[in-house]
Image (cartoon, rainbow, N blue to C red):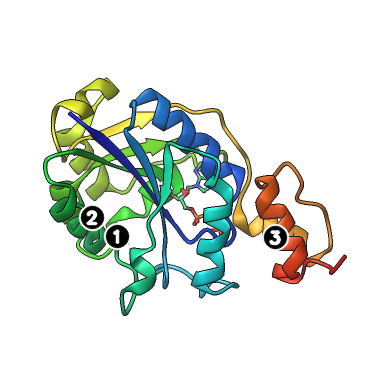
Amino acid sequence: MRTVGVLGGTFDPIHLGHLRPAEEVREALQLAELRLIPARIPPHRARPRVCAETRAALVRAAVADHPGATVDERELHREGPSYTVDTLAELRAELGPVSLCLILGLDTFRGLPGWSRWRRLFDYAHLVVTERPGAGGSLPAALRAELEQRRCTDPAELRRSVAGRVCFQSVTPVDISATGIRRALACGRSVRYLVPEPVRERLAREGLYGYPQL
Ligand code: ATP
């Protein structure tokens, strides 16, 4: 079955810790497409530092030369908080019977029970959870219970159904966060090799996140 991967995020800004794990998932699952979906108003966190249009432009710059990746800006055009369950429902209606895989870092997966209508996510997509340095520790009981029903160990299984399973995908650990990038930029430190080069150039050119003008 055709398999489509979705990576949502605040991307404030996008960095290689988003992209390398997602690329490894793309290969492991033989995704026909990897869709990056920037959130306009993330429901679970402080307001992003940079407007949604600029964050999306940085995401576009990051994957412009990657034929396997696309940027989906639907959340930018939707009023109110960017709930992932709404996005997945729309994608499911548009894409029909494909295997839809929502990619999440372990830190984000752990917070799932705090998401709007979180159990409905499984009606629309599989979940592919990647490691993230510093994201160890136990899972909430509600999530553990759900996992017992849904966990699969072979990623190939995800290709055989459209939604509802959870798979852990081991990836190269990349200890980069947007918080760390914002801090570095605010202090005038280099972010070279932490973000894709076209992203670094644009951050510098536009003085984003306090990047000193050159
Ligand atoms: P911030 O530091 O501002 O909280 P972030 O770096 O966590 O941001 P998000 O845009 O919130 O970035 O993350 C989007 C998705 O990418 C989440 O599922 C998150 O778990 C995952 N992700 C982000 N950074 C990494 C990383 N270094 N390794 C693996 N997954 C990551």
Residue at 23 percent of width and 60 percent of height: 85
Q: Badge 2, how many Cα within 10 Å: few under 14, some, many 20+?
A: many
Say the numbered circle drawn on residue 198: none
The kind of residue tagged 1 is: Thr
- Decide if residue 141 is on the left or right side of residue 188: left
User: What is the distance, in whole Å, between disc 3 and disc 2 at their CAs?
Assistant: 30 Å
Label 1–label 2 contact, CB within 8 A:
yes
Q: Badge 3, how many Cα within 10 Å: few under 14, some, many 20+?
A: some
The kind of residue tagged 2 is: Leu
Q: Quadrant of the C terminus?
A: bottom right
Label 1–label 3 contact, CB within 8 A:
no
- Secondary structure category for the residue under label 1: helix
Residue 209: x and y, percent? Answer: 70, 69
- Residue at the disc numbered 3: 202
Residue 91: x and y, percent? Answer: 22, 54
Does mark 2's beta carbon lie closer than 8 Å to ligand 1? Answer: no
| Front-lying residue, 45 or 191 | 191
The kind of residue tagged 3 is: Arg
- Decide if residue 75 is on the left or right side of residue 165: right
* Figure quadrant of residue 31: top left
Q: Badge 1, how many Cα within 10 Å: few under 14, some, many 20+?
A: many
